[in-house]
Structures are given as C-alpha cells and as structure tokens.
Image: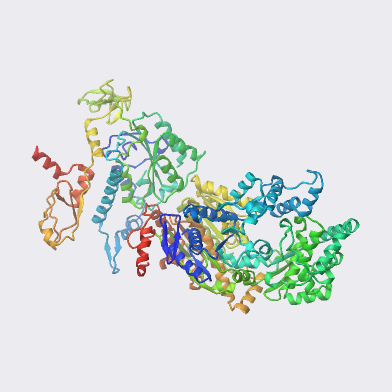
Amino acid sequence: MKFQIEDVTVYFPYDYIYPEQYEYMVELKRALDARGHCLLEMPTGTGKTVALLSLITSYALARPSPPLKLLYCTRTVHEMEKTLAELRLLHSHLPPTHRSLALGLSSRKNLCVNPYVLSSASRDSVDSACRRLTASWVRAAAAEQPPGAVPTCSFFESYDRAASSGPDAVLLPPGVYTLGDLRALGREKGWCPYFLARQMIRYANVVVYSYQYLLDPKVAGIISREMQRECVVVFDEAHNIDNVCIEALSVSVRRQTLDGATRNLHRMAQEIDRFKATDASRLRAEYNRLVEGLAQRGNLALTDAWLSNPALPDDILKEAVPGNIRRAEHFLSVLRRLVQYLKGRLQTENVETERPVDFVASVSSQAGIDQKMLRFCYDRLHSLMLTLEITDTDEFLHIQTICDFATLVGTYMQGFSIIIEPFDERMPHIPDPVLQLSCHDASLAIKPVFDRFQSVIITSGTLSPIDLYPRLLNFNPVISRSFTMSLTRDCICPMVLTRGSDQLPVSTKFDMRSDPGVVRNYGRLLLEMVAAVPDGIVCFFVSYSYMDGIVNSWNEMGILQDVMQHKLVFIETQDVVETTLALDNYRRACDCGRGAVFFSVARGKVAEGIDFDRHYGRLVIMFGVPFQYTLSRILIARLEYLRNTFQIKEGDFLTFDALRQAAQCVGRVIRSKADYGMMIFADKRYSRHDKRSKLPGWILSHLHDAHLNLSTDMALHIAREFLRRMAQPYDKAGTGGRKTLLSQEDLEKMGEDPMNMF
Amino acid sequence: MSGSVAVHRGSLGFPAMGGGEERRKRGGDDEEEEEEEEEENGVRGMEAWERAYADERSWEALQEDESGLLRPIDTKTLVHAQYRRRLLLRSAAASSAAPRIQKGLIRYLYVVIDLSRAASEMDFRPSRMVVVAKCVENALELVYGYLSQIPSYGHREVLILYSALNTCDPGDIMETVQQCKKAKIRCSVIGLSAEIYICKHLCEETGGSYTVALDESHFKELLLEHAPPPPAIAEYAAANLIRMGFPQRGADGVISICSCHKEAKVGGGYTCPRCKARVCELPTECQICGLTLVSSPHLARSYHHLFPVTPFNEVSSRIPTKWSQKLPQTCYGCQQSLVSHGGKSDPHVSCPKCNQHFCLDCDIYIHESLHNCPGCESQHGSTT
C-alpha cells in the first residue's frame, strides 16, 4: 500500500498497517525532518522493523539529494537476516525506478566461501586463515614464484582483477543482498563476497550490520570510516546499548593473556633477528616511516588493514610515534617491561581499584613507560606486525590485548577505572587473578556516532524509563516516545505474584532466597502451572548459581519429579552447544504435545536472543528481580561514576537495569499480535510502585490492579480462565472503535481529518 | 454405550464403537446419560454447604452491572444470542460456498474420550471426567485401524474430547497425523482446559475443528456443533449409489437369535431384508451380510441438513411505536404475547419468507428441533 505522511509518500509492503506503526512512522519522520536523534519504544510483534525500513527508504526517495544512507545495526546475524528479508519484501513494493542497493555485512566467518579458510573453527582463525592467503606480501611472493608454490585465494584474486579496472566493474546491480545471496553470488562469479561487500557498502543505500561496526572503535575505524554525514543510523533492539558501548572500551587481562603475550614477544624477537640477518632494509624502512610520522593506514592494501586503534578517532593525536619505541627491539623491550609489570600487579592478594592517572604514574615510575608510549602501543604493534609479515594474527591475540589495554589506559583519564581482583568473589578458593580496565561511561563510545551522523535512532521493545537513556548516553533526543500495542483482545496477561499458596511472601531478596519456605513456594507455583498451562513454559532465574541451588532443592523435595510427570525439563547452561541442543529438544517436546519447561537465566544468551513465541512459550515465570551482582567491583565503580557525573542514583540505576532485564525476559513470549502468553513476576518486590512503574508501557497497560498482589492459587485460577478465553476464535481486524488494522482508505480518511487521529 | 454419540440428533450417522481402551471406564459422553452420572457422583462425602461452594458456584450466576450492582445473569437472552451466533455462522458458511453443498451424511464417527488424571480436575461440574467421559497417538492408530476399512461414501471422523494438556506418545505423532490426513480421517478435538499445539496441528492438517470449552454449557454447545454433517470431501463428492436395506420390525413374541448380542431375544428388533438376520437397533450395518440398515424416518430426518430453515431476522425492539403497532402482538408459533408490560415489544424474530413473527423460544425450537417453519408450511398448505 501507499500513503502520505505529510509530504512524503510512504511505500508499505503490506495491505494493512497497525495504528501504532503509523504513529511510529509519523514520529520518525519528524525526527528525520529535524535532523536529530530519537528514542522510540514500541513492543515487539508490532512490526517495528518494517515500519522503520519503510519510512526511511521512502523518505530517502522523497528527498533524493543529498542521498540519505541507512545504516541499520542489529545484534545478531539472525536478526540481520530477518531485517534483510523484510527489506526485500519492501523492495518488491517500490516503484521499479526507485530500486536501491541494500546489503548485509558480517565477519569473514559468515561471508567467506573459500573452503580451505572456512575449515577453521573460530572467527579469529578464519580471519587469520584469510590473511595467510591474501596479505599483500603473500600475494607478492606468489606472483614471483611459479603458480601453485604459494597458496592464494582464487576468489580474492579474481575479485581483485575485476576491481582493478575501476570500482564500477564490480558494482552490484540494485537489489537486496543477504549474506546468503552474497555468498551465492561470490561462488557464481568467483569473487570474494567479504571484500566485495566491504567495497559495496560505500555505494549501498542500506547497510545492515552489527553494532560493533559503529561502536567498537577498533572495527569502526576501518569499516565505517568513509560513511558520509547524511546517514540515518538505526540501533535495533537497543535496550542494552549502554552495555555494548562499555564493553567496546573495556579490556580484561588474565594470567593466560600475559603468558601468551610473553610467548608472542619471544616469537617476534626471533622474527626480528631473522629479518636482521636477511632483510635489514625492511626494518630500516619502517623506522624511517615512523620518523616521518606517516599515517600508517592510508597506503595499506585492503587486505592488510587490521583492526584499527581502540581509542576513539577524536582522541587520537596526530603526531609521530615517540622516538624510544621506533626501533623494533626497543619497542619489544618496552612491551616486555609492561607485561612484567602487569604480572607483578596480578600477584596481589587484595582487590585493588585504581584510577587510570594513578596507574599510568605507577607504570611510569616502576617500568619506565610514560603515557605517550602507552598511547602509541597499539599502532606501533600494528606497524611491527606488518613489517614482520605476520599473518597468523589469531596467535597474536594476547599481545594485541595488552597493547589495546595500554593504548586505552594511556588515552583516557576520565570514565575508566582499573580493578584487580585476585579471585572471583563467588569462588574465593580458586585463585583467578584478573586485571580489568573497565569503562563506566557509555557515552564515550557512542559520542562519535552521535556527532558524525545526521540522525541516530535508538529503538527497542523495552526502553523504559525512556528518560534514563539520554542521560546514560549523554545526548539530546529530539523525539522520545513510547508506543503501546493496539490489540483486538487482551492477549498478554502479566501478573505479579507476591505470595505462595500458604500466603507467605516470596522473593529472591538476599535474606529470603535460601529460605526453604520460599523455595517450596516457588516450586509449588511451577508445579501448579505445569499442570494448567499447555505446551511450553519458560522460567527465568536471577543467576546461574541461584538456578543451580533452587533446582537442587526442588530435586530433593521431589518437586522436580512431579513437574516431569507433566512436562519435560530443560536447562540452559553456560555451554552454548549444550544450550542449543536443549532448546532444540525443548521445541520438539512442545511440537509433539509432550510439553516442556525451560529453565533459563536473565541476562543469559537465551534471555537476549531466543524467541519463545506461540506454543513455545505460553507462560513465562520470572523468579525474582534480576538485579546485577551488587558486590561486583566493576558495578560499584560504575555506580559511583554515574552518581558523580550524571547524577543518577545507585538505586535508580540498579532498579532500571533489573527491570529492563525482566521486561526483556518476559517479552520473549509475545512476538506477534496473534500470539498470546502470560507473564508471572514472582517476587513481592514487583508490587512496589518504584519497581513496577519501570516496566514498559505495553506491559503496564495490561497489568490490572487486581493482578498486582496474587497468591499461587489465585494466579492459577486467572491462568486457567485466560487460557480458555484465548483459545476461542477471535476477530483479527478489530471492529468499531478499536480498529487495529488500517487500510489505505482509512489512512486517507485520517489524512483529510487530522483531528480524528486516535 | 459410548455408541450413540453426538449423532443421535437426526443425522444419519452410524454409531461406531469407541476404541477399546477408551471404553475401559464408563464414558458418560451422551447428554442423557450425563445427568444420571451426575447423580451417581453427587455423593462424594461432602457436606451440602461444601458442595454449594465446590460444585455449584452460585457466584458465577451473578454479574456486576455498570453501577456496581449485582444481578443475575440474564440467561435467556444470553442463550438466544449464543444460538443466533451459531445459526448465522452456519448459514454464512453455507452461503459463502456453493449454494448447494454436498454434505457427507453417512458418517463413521469415533469418539475418543480422555480419561487421564487431568480428567479428574474439578473445574467443570462435577468433574471433567463426568462431563465428558490419553495418548493421542495410540487412539488415532486404533481409530485408523477401524476406519480404514470403511467404504468411500462414508465419512471418517474422529472426535476427541481432550482434557489433559499433554500427550505421551510411544512413537512420532507427526507421522500418525499425516497417516490420518492421507486416509481422509477428519479429526476434531474439543479441549477442556487450553489450546494445545499438537491438537491444533492435528485438526488443521485433517480439516477438523478445534475448540476449547469455556464452561459446561459451552461444552455442550461445542459438542452439538459436531452433530450437523460436515461438507463432503471434494474427492469423494462423486455421486454413487449405496445399497441400503429397510428392515421390518419383528413381530411381538417371536423368538429369534440376535446377531448383535449373539443370544436369543423375544420380540422387537428388526429383520435384515437380505439375510433375515435379527438386529436390535437401527441404523446399523448387518453383521451377517454387511448391508446398511436404516429406517425411512432416519433418511427423512437427515433431509433438513441439506435444506435448512433459513435463519430468521431479528426484529429490533427500538422500532418507533407507530410501526410496532402494526406488528403482530403474538408469536405465530405458540400464541404467547410478544408485548411486554411496558407496551414495548420484546425482542423477537420474523421469518424472511412468510413474514410471520416468532418468540425467541419458538425460534430455537424451529431451527433446532422442528426444522420446518410453521408459517411457511401453513401458507403452503392453503395454496395447494
């Protein structure tokens, strides 16, 4: 269908549109008009992605100059594929003259088609296997020697031949290219899909890629450097964006890292000796280049580009590498001293927290490395590795981590702290020293994105309270709004369960969580529910350790055995393969009617990325409030920073963080409007206003007052009624005043009479 | 006894025996039997006041109005509204398809009754087991075994009354579902607790209906929905002749050996016109020669499924008094007054063909039991 929003003709790939999608587009358009950033919360299952894509594409068509580019950031490859599929549908509805180029970009692991490279298991080893075949010196060697003597990648070679005649030779025709399409195209033409995609993002109108390509300065430096200002950046499912930002600038160093770094240094020293004996001119050339302070990246071949500096572009000083690390041997000895120093620091018996300033001062006095040398470590290492023609970069991850750390600690004085813990708080008997450089300020990593691009759109199903995000990320949205879902029937049923059937309160509060009464009440709740709810039930616990504990107790009490009579039990573990297998079998048990319960952990992989829609999740029980581990040093340091810098109270932040996780967990069960599901918040603390009010609006609007303080038996009764009601046939379109599907005529009518809008 | 199920309402269906397993316990699936069962089960060692809370749930018959006052639920209009919905649904389905749908009148319907532990849940009065009478796969396999022998004119159907929320199957149920689909067995499920994916899947695949009962009366309503014959399956829609016998009723006092009970019976029964064997009940299939035995009223009673009485139009009570005075004051069927004390007319209906007015009770009676419109019939009689 096709309709007008103010002066923009919007192409929408479906015949009907939800009213909230329309409103969402209106707000989005205003934000684009204002060339500002915006923050939009809309529940999942309301077609957020298609609304976004449809409006931005139509907007770009309506305003052809300057050309507007869409950078769409997703968290996972799966979401990327879903987005591209929606985009393809949208493209088939655009007028043929308006076709544009859209593609997905991912790592080599997802794009490579060379069977030899793909046989590597991890992402890093795929990267280095690729470098081994495509690095400029490898190709140069291959050109000199008889064909076949030095292995190269045939896909890259033929792509390079095609591209050498000008960028137009490899320009893709307009259309939507998913990762699978790119791979198929690569196989067909014999071109390397990864480098083709890297090249194409400059010309594409829509690029779908991962958060890291914009937020992690190391990756963003090479991938997103050339994007123009006229870009609309969308962060989808962005409720955890502050954590992504923080992780992008945090480094942790363990004993294994330091041991590995020592090995790396040893090998590099050998390489240097070898070069000195055979080809000393290379080292001299590098030295001269560094003296002249040449920018290293400008003249590098595409394949040699390595991850760039971890510090943000604005913070890098444009100056030459300091003299005392220009010579390779000198630089290695500096690194050796640094590694030695860090080893010494890790041997501490106590937890230590330091500010970067103190740490740099201490490095300077004890190891003789000043701040400027630290800051240049990463670039210097990069240069050295190129000079030494090292291709197996996955072997050198350890020393990279150390230099990463050094550069960050040398660059930033504010918003970071260094925390050294001799052991994990929860397992004090096992020594596991770790030195962490943790970033507390999410706004640091995202600042260049806000500054560089015209509009940044942050959207998710759970962004409540919506006023906190601008403070955490330190920006001024022109529009921030939360939308609710228009429904023909009340298909979600949130409940707050505060008491067990014996009327005693339940909670995972620290002093109550191990109380056998609470454990038993939680068990009874599960038992009652498995007998009353069909197909799949998902349970979320606050942590792995709590889940282990309570499942053990249930086992001893015989509750687990009773549960098994109704449904099979599956448990998420920290092992990805095991969890995938469990999920797979869980789905099968739901399909064949046996019924299943999945035990999972808030903040875990499952809570973040797996959907439990339709019969895979008719009920989700959130056992307790998923607060972060409040004794964690990193959290304490971050809270202190937030209080001092942004005036955010500790309690507010902790509650906000816990509730967004809880909302994220329970939101897993509703993925479309035709779906239905129940959500039980099983903790007495949820009934308090300060907790409850931080839930997203679309959950709150269905949380009736009568459901705020339930006991197990009452919840059971409500559940039975709800399930029977939902099993009845219903009217999908909605009638009368509660219209939930709008056709083109409806929209046109609304356009004529703007006062009559909802 | 789980034989004369759902089909007793006049469609020419042939009672088939419920699967052996399912018959283990008493299956009180029939409406007439239901009441007896209730009485049997009534005494469960509970005091009368306990029963008032546990079983009768008197509070459910109350409703809160806009001003917060409690009042009894107006059951009559409610029942009628439900009935209208059902009727209109049915006629809408009929009119949307071809005007004359061939209907599968000869149905072989197996009723599978869930007697698992979940059936003893008490949320239906007096318990789910009594309201209706587990392993879906085994049941389907069993039914498949019985039904696969049936000639192509017969409709193979299974109605599962399911109260559990899961099924524990020995093999792959998906295969069994596909097998049933291939054999054109129409599987329908009435659930008692909640929607279960596998049941929905089964019904969607095999073209049956899946419904979940809200309460006892809704359950009855859903069960009755299965009484009218479903549209014939297209592949089998070709007209073919079926050999049928119309047996004579045996004379009183004649002693003969009954072919269905394998014992000597005195009087009653019917004699197969082909092999002269005695059977007890009609309709059935002769045990000896396999001839389909029916009586002519059975055929006549199935006629209304093909030519149903058109649904009546509702007459709005908000018509201005000027108009309502011209309207008839009494129901054409029962002669009861259609005007309430206030002078306003009660909600009632009129036949679109003969324009006679009927009260709500007569409306239900005509459509559900009589299957003839008295107004149209009397016009018919006067003209000829």
Q: How many marks?
A: 0
Q: Residue furthest right?
A: A277
Q: How is the image coloured?
A: rainbow
Left or right of B216, for residue A549:
right
Q: Is the residue A425 above or below the residue B2 in the image?
A: below
Q: Is the residue B54 above or below the residue A660 in the image?
A: above
Q: Where's residue A541, x and y in %?
A: 57, 61
In depth, the one of A67 and B209 nearer the eye is A67
Left or right of A365, for residue A241:
left
In depth, the one of A370 and A36 nearer the eye is A36
Q: Where's residue A128, x and y in %?
A: 74, 53
Q: Where's residue A634, x and y in %?
A: 67, 70
Report whether residue B222 is seen.
yes
Which residue occupies 23% across, 30% down?
B295
Q: Is the residue A655 above or below the residue B358 in the image?
A: below
Q: Quadrant of the C terminus of chain B?
A: top left
Left or right of A737, for residue A127:
right
